[in-house]
Image (tube, rainbow, N blue to C red):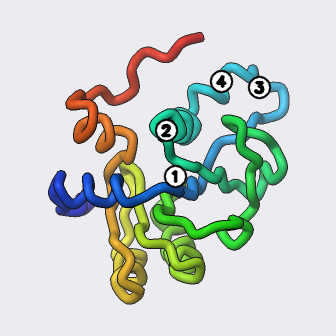
Amino acid sequence: METQIMSDEQIKSILEKSKTIAMIGISSEKKGEDPKNLKRKPANVVMKYMQDFGYKVYPINPFAEGEIINNEKVLADLKNIPEKVDIVDVFRPSKETPEIANQAKAIGSKVLWLQYGIHSDEAKEIAASSDMEFISNRCIKQEYQKIFQKSNPVFPALKK
């Protein structure tokens, strides 16, 4: 698994310039599941954290379209977002990322960000072909914490 080599200064610049994030793979409530579990799912924790620091985050999950997660209506697809997206942040398997990269390219996203454990050379090539910055195998929340809050926790104890 390759970790994208990008300096803290480059990531800081991306995070400072960006205002909107499309988060692909946000978790929805499963039938019969305790609703409190939803707040603990990694994509949802990251979404809430980035919202708390002023980012407009669009949750994307075709199986949860119309649901409200972290006070935002879940959209089925990137093309349904009503404004320009700066970062497409991906919580989906690596094999799905080339198609997501093509969708991010189609909407003119500036950055394709693949979370921990996710990498695709094909997605990287697609991003490069459209002058999209590419980050893989890194957590946007952790990078924000490290750069702007000078802390490095993974996921602090979550409240019940």
Q: Secondary structure at mark 2?
A: helix
- Of the 4 image quadrants, the one containing the N terminus is bottom left
As measured in the structure, the alpha-carbon distance from the residue carrying label 1 to the one carrying label 3 is 20 Å
Of marks 1 and 3, which one's residue comes earlier in the chain?
Answer: 3
What whole-number distance in Å separates the C-alpha atoms at marks 4 and 1?
A: 17 Å
Residue occupied by mark 2: 46
Label pair 1/2, CB-CB below 8 angstroms: yes
Q: CB atoms at circles 3 and 4 under 8 Å apart?
A: yes
Q: Residues within 10 Å of mark 3 (few under 14, many from 20)?
A: few
**Mark 4, residue position:** 37
The type of residue carrying mark 4 is Asn
The amino acid sitting under disc 1 is Phe
Q: Badge 1: few (under 14), some or many (20 or more) residues near its Cα, within 10 Å?
A: many
Residue that label 3 marks: 33
Query: How many angstroms separate mark 4 from mark 2 (CA)?
Result: 14 Å
Q: Residue furthest bottom?
A: 129
Looking at the picture, which amino acid does disc 2 mark?
A: Val
In this rendering, the answer to whether 116 lies above or below 45 is: below
